[in-house]
Image: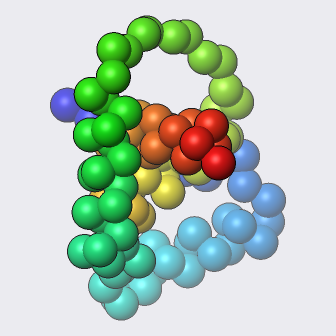
């Protein structure tokens, strides 16, 4: 079971009005994730998962985590996979 990101807790007035406008809109939301980008993210995740893995604990602000989860939803990937790919991309140059 996945949790929905906590959106709306740490928004400024402009962000809150944008969220409200999106929620009232009848326009369908579309992902910016192309099939090619999804394949690249999946390949990075597979490469990262193929190594021996070590569990870590990390504290992040709730607002950053909510935004990260929101971005992961937009990208169509689990948020932990997105975190892993961000770390992998950073350390790989």
Image quarter (top left, top right, bottom left or bottom right) of the N terminus? top left
Residue 56 placement (x, y as % from top left): 51, 11
Q: Residue at x 37, y 15 (%)?
A: 53
Q: Nearer the viewer, residue 29 or 59?
A: 59
Q: Residue at x 72, y 55 (%)?
A: 11
Residue 79 is left or right of residue 10, and the answer is left
Residue 10 is left or right of residue 57, and the answer is right
Residue 6 appears in the figure: no
Residue 88 is left or right of residue 93, and the answer is left
The answer to whether 84 is drawn above or below residue 24 in the figure is: above
Can you name the residue that lies furthest to the bottom here?
Answer: 27
Q: Residue at x 57, y 69 (%)?
A: 19
Residue 68 appears in the figure: yes
Q: Quadrant of residue 80?
A: top left
Q: Nearer the viewer, residue 59 or 89?
A: 89
Residue 87 placement (x, y as % from top left): 57, 37
């Amino acid at each position: 079971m996945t949790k929905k990101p906590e959106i709306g807790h740490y928004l400024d007035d402009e962000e809150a009005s944008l969220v409200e406008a999106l929620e009232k809109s009848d326009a369908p939301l579309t992902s910016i994730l192309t099939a090619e980008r999804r394949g690249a993210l999946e390949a990075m995740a597979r490469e990262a998962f193929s190594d021996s893995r070590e569990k870590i604990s990390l504290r992040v602000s709730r607002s950053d985590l909510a935004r990260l989860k929101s971005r992961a939803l937009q990208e169509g990937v689990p948020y932990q996979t997105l975190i892993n790919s961000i770390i992998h991309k950073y350390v790989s140059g």
